[in-house]
Image (cartoon, helix red, strand yellow):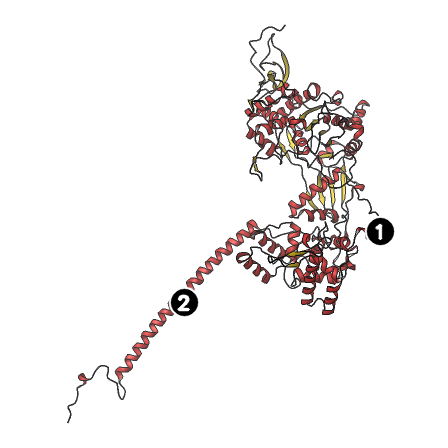
Amino acid sequence: MADKKLPQDIPANAPVQGGNPGGGKNARAVWKTIGRVSLRILTYIMNTLLTIFLIGAVCGIIVGTVFCIYIKNYVDPEIDSSLLVGASSDTTTRIYYMDYETEEDRISEDGTPVEIEDQRLYSSDNSIWVSYEQMPEDLINAFTSIEDHRFFEHNGVDWLRTGKAVFTYFFGAGDFGGSTITQQLVKNLTGDKENSIQRKVQEIFRALNLEKEMSKEEILEMYLNIIFLGNNCYGVQAAANTYFGKDVSELSLVECASLAAIVKNPTKYEPVRHDVVMYEDENGEEYEDGNRARRNTVLYTMHQYGKINEAEYEEALETELVLHTEEDDGGEEESAEHINSWYTDAVISDVRDALMEEYGYSSYTASLAIYTGGLQIYTCMDPKVQDVLEEVYVNDEQYFPYATSGLQPESAMIVLDPYTGDVLGLVGGRGEKTQNRILDRATQALRPVGSSIKPLSVYAPAVDLEIITMGSVYDDVPVRETETGAPWPRNLPNVYGGLTTIQDAVRRSVNTIAVRVLQDLTVDYSFHFLKDTLHMENVIESYTTQSGQVVSDKDLAPLALGQFSYGITLWELTAGYDMFPNEGVYSESRLWYKVLDSDGNVILENESDYEIAISEEAASIMTLMLQGVVSSGTGTAITLDQYVDVAGKTGTTTADFDRTFVGYTPYYLGGVWVGYDMNQALSDFGTNPALQVWDTVMTMLHEDILSSVNAGEQELQNFEISDRLVKCSYCRYSGLLPTETCWQETGYFTKDTVPTEYCYGHTPQE
């Protein structure tokens, strides 16, 4: 009989037979361990996912907040298209002047509006508005198929195309693309085509807002009326007239496709010169890519989206595009274009700029609003002043000095109210005006102005700061030598007179004295006085040209001698002088008061902006010195001063390319420029021709005033000289109180600057 094994002799890993309570416990322990490990792993995973979620949420909130701040600070989601909605009525814009009984009425703008009937503005031939109902269905389908086939489905933004465009921008060609017709309309309204994220985001928000304000039909109507279609054609009606000689409602399918083909690249796809164009690819293989190839693509897309059937598609592909030519008109002359006055053209440009700034419009859109928006523009024009200016400049051979060389110089003149700065009249060129929107030499041309800048940039601020007085004495000798050893600056005539008073320097326009006073005033102060106080936008602080050259008007020659880098306008120059007759107050000049829409709502206001530029005493001192220019200085050719107070300053530029004169009376302020558009010396003229033109115009303007004065109907106005000035004699060589041996001058001083010490050192006069 075998020996029995004791329990302790059984191996621990022996198989259990017949059930073993100990083995069940071990299994449960294993499963518990697995459960605990799994739970820990699951908890770790959940914590990780939760952490990632929280980080993402926080980042999303941060990014969202930053994006909202960015939108608030840098993106303007609004665009006002109200001036163009309903423009299909082609409403006429009317221009008015205000009839004032007195100068006080003018200052308070209490007048009666009078329409200038011969200056009504109509839509131009190359921009004709057509209603949505007049557009054929094929035209609508052609443009929407090729440009935005989901146009009637999206809310202004095609998010699928936008997503693809964003992906392409960051990982592909680097261009946005993906614009809907609504977004293209926004781009055309604003003229903003910058390829930037900010512009694209702003465009998206504006498109979304535009779709809330306008119906799809209104958006398409506006888009198809302002889109550029090559050859100076804006809108489908102008393009239909130009390319096919017909109304847009009469366009065939192939003609509609041809117009839709142009949008992608108006220069490349316009059909007159680029209907069939052959190119070579990089492998030297020829391919076609003109209007025909592009319009076939338009037709294919229309067929693809079910806008035309197979038969229409095949027929259109085989149809020849017949273009309209000038010969098709049968030689009939077009009706003469209505010619605007110089004043009206200036108003159009200025109102256009104001619309662009106020509403974010492009230049074209703003012009379209003016010509077709039925606006009412209230101008500052005085018809009497404008008529006199046009009389003199149209009949220029009668009133202008003659250049014996044959080629006559150009000229421009502008007349302002000396107390409000309002532009009463202007002309931008000699002879009869034969075109619209041409170069206006009074408000647009940038020219150096010579010595006529000195009272504004040097003498007025220096008198105001009490750096100089009428009796201050400077040495009229060259300030320095040029690189070639020549003395600088040169006077005209080229002589140097030694000790010279400010009064005499202004009267004779001595260049050296202007430079020396500017050095005492400082270039920085002078520059900012012109730029910030007198608002001369065209003076340049610093600019780097394409060649890398740095130019600046913050220097002695530009500020003391008027040799500006690019020049300033005659309007800017003349407006600066209104602080002298207006007791030191600068009035920002303007052409118009306000603009109303077709419903009579004010959409633009151009309120007067007054600013104290110099003291009343300084203004009076400058007027007295500028009277000396006319009575015994460089402006003695003026004859009007025999009848009424006249003050002013002449200007002649280096090489004698430009002559100017800015002068004023108690009634009017006027500036004249004479010169050649392409620089040429005015050597034929011994006397400044600007003086003769100014004297002629101003004499005619004052005729009624002087007649009324002579008839005893009114009193003649004189310059108002501050009663706080002190009249005093002084020595012309020292500026001190004169003794018996001094050469005496008489001048005006403030109580703080009147001389108190007597001159010494002179020998008795012979």
Amino acid type at image mark 1 = Gly
Name the residue nearer the viewer: 296 or 654.
Answer: 296
Residue 343 visible: yes
Residue 248 vertical position relative to residue 484 in the rendered view, above or below: below
Name the quadrant containing residue 217.
Answer: bottom right
Quarter of the image that includes the C terminus:
top right
Residue 613, image x and y in percent?
61, 30
Residue 726 visible: no
Q: Nearer the viewer, mark 2 or mark 1?
A: 1
Residue in view at x 84 percent, y 49 percent:
332
Tag 2 secondary structure: helix
Amino acid type at image mark 2 = Met
Residue 759, image x and y in percent?
57, 11
Left or right position of 647 against 500 = right
Residue 286, image x and y in percent?
65, 58
Residue in view at x 64 percent, y 48 percent:
360
Residue sitting at the far front: 284
The number of callouts visible is 2
Left or right position of 420 against 512 = right
Q: Which residue is mark 1?
A: 330
Question: Badge 1 local density, few (<14 within 10 Å), some, or many (20+)?
Answer: few
Residue sitting at the far bottom: 1
Instruction: Compute the Cα span from label 2 to label 1.
Output: 85 Å
Q: Which residue is mark 2?
A: 46
Quarter of the image that includes the N terminus:
bottom left
Residue in view at x 80 percent, y 41 percent:
118
Residue 560 vertical position relative to residue 370 in the rendered view, above or below: above
Residue 716 vertical position relative to residue 20 in the rendered view, above or below: above
Name the residue nearer the viewer: 278 or 159.
Answer: 278
Residue 380, image x and y in percent?
73, 37
Name the quadrant containing residue 717.
Answer: top right
Residue 633 vertical position relative to residue 345 in the rendered view, above or below: above
